[in-house]
Amino acid sequence: MPTRAFVSKELAKLLGVLSHPHRIRIIEELRDGERDVNSLQSVLGVSHSGVSQHLSLLRSHRLVEERREGRHVFYHLSQPALARWLTGGLDFLEGSATQVSELRDAVEATKSLWTTSG
């Protein structure tokens, strides 16, 4: 497989894993350090098993790692830069929101002009 196709496929897998809001939130919650399932459950408002399933998927794709301390399991990002990368996505959303807002304002202004001049 050519390198660009291989890399594109791997990047698509990564984006697929990140394609759920709870998994994005988990990554953001792990930005500043370790958390256990109970603390993630509390912040996300998701069931214990739901958080565990999301963590399992993130772990299987090597995005998070676990550390055991007795019966408690703590999770952390395997590459903290992932959280910074996701935060960079906010710049894109912010730019899109500005364009949408500008378009909405232009449409409203145009509607006003077209309906009053006819």
Image: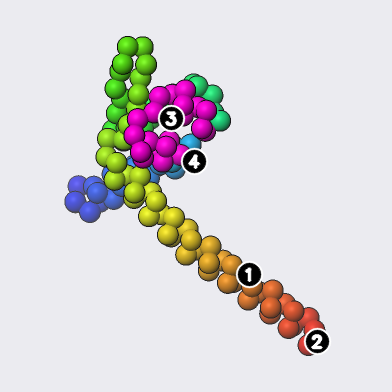
- Residue matched to label 3: 54
- Residue matched to label 4: 21
> Relative to 112, does residue 11 appear above or below in the rendering?
above
Question: Disc 2 or disc 3, which is closer to the eye?
Answer: 3
Q: Secondary structure at mark 1?
A: helix
Question: Residue 18: percent from the left, percent from the top?
Answer: 40, 41
Q: CA distance from mark 2 to mark 3?
A: 56 Å
Residue at left offset 42%, top offset 37%: 29
Q: CA distance from mark 4 to mark 3?
A: 10 Å
The amino acid type of the residue labelled 2 equals Gly
43 in the magenta segment = yes
* Image side of residue 48 versus residue 8, left or right: right
- Residue matched to label 2: 118
Region of the chain picked out in magenta, as a range: 25-44
27 in the magenta segment = yes
> Is any part of residue 51 visible from this angle?
no
